[in-house]
Amino acid sequence: MIYQTAADWTAASRKRVLLFGMSGLGKTHLASMLRGTGGWFHYSVDYRIGTRYMGEYIADNFKREAMKVPFLRELLLTDSVYIASNITFDNLAPLSTYMGKPGNPAQGGLSFAEYLRRQDQHRASEIAALQDTTRFIDRASDIYGYDNFVCDSGGSICEVVDPANPEDPVLRELSQNLLMVWIKGSDAHTAELIRRFDRAPKPMYYQPHFLERMWGSYRADTGLSADQVNPDTFVRWTYAQALAHRQPRYAAMAEWGVTITAEEVAQVRDVAGFNDLIARAIEEKQAQA
């Protein structure tokens, strides 16, 4: 770890952390709080994916849909309108919409082959966005004068790295430049995330072998053809299993850094509280060594 002791962290004039864990446990909340103090640069991996790496895919998809409407088609063909996504740190809907869900086209579903193609685009984009982190640390300092840096990673980071491999290029690069911080949720948090997802299912990135296994199992259990699958029902069914699939991967990633809990995150009110929380996490890591 780049901070070997709590004293190293406390004394550091340049604090750099990467937050990871399940979506909904406080990564963006913490990062936004730190950014709001004026002393931290907030790098959002999902925002970077949706703008730098998948922005053109997203805009082209908007245009493809607009071309189906005669009124908009004529305006597009004459360059009379401009179509683009309006992704923000707090609104990643354009990215989620593009990722889509497989199933019945009448219910907005994609063919499974197209769904896998977009998943693969996301995988490549997420790896690239994670690898951009070090460059943004330098940019934040050189251009804007920020010494402190927080990387707000996406929930699927554990799907695109191999935490059991000490030579994993992404984790090696990240851990050499930032303190890896796992926000760990409890069983109660997992149950609440599932309830929240059930109310508003959204697309996610999954490893292809996991996704293919889920797709095959769901169709075998239900007896439905690909075009009969309700997209929302399928992703709801998959989500709880995806959380179980991800948990040991997050835990393995935590070996590269430290662990804090979602309950502890909920108690953080300011930078001092955050710094104290990280210092305690480093002390706990030392005690376990």
Image (spheres, grey):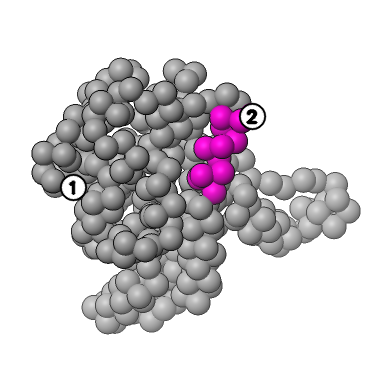
Left or right placement of residue 268 versus residue 36 in this view:
left
Q: Which residue bears the numbered disc 1?
A: 191
Is residue 80 or residue 131 the one in the foreground?
A: 131
Q: Which residue lies furthest to the right in this view?
A: 78
Q: Does the magenta stretch include residue 138?
A: yes
Circle 1: residue type: Ala
227, above or below 254, in the image: below
Residue pictured at 36% horizontal, 30% vertical = 30
Q: Quadrant of residue 240?
A: bottom left
Q: Residues within 10 Å of mark 1 (few under 14, many from 20)?
A: few
Q: In this view, does 39 lie above or below 87?
A: above
Q: Are marks 2 and 1 in contact (CB under 8 Å)?
A: no
Classify residue 157 as left or right of residue 56: left
Instruction: Work out whether residue 267 can be spotted.
Output: yes
Q: Is residue 205 above or below residue 151?
A: below
Where's residue 171, x and y in %?
38, 55
Q: Which of 278 and 61 is in front in this view?
A: 278
Residue 93 visible to an observer of this rendering: no
Instruction: Report x, y in % for residue 22.
Output: 30, 48
Which residue is at 24% across, 78% downward? 221
Residue furthest to the left in view is 287
**Does label 2 or label 1 sit earlier along the sequence?**
2
Q: Name the residue under label 2.
A: 143
Would you call the spot at circle 2 few (<14 residues within 10 Å), some (14-19), or many (20 or more)? few
The kind of residue tagged 2 is: Ile
Residue 214 in which image quadrant: bottom left
Give the residue displayed 53% in from the left and 71% down from the top: 117
Residue range highlighted in magenta: 132-143
Image check: 216 left or right of 14?
Answer: left
> Is 102 or 264 nearer to us in this picture?
264
Tag shown at residue 60: none
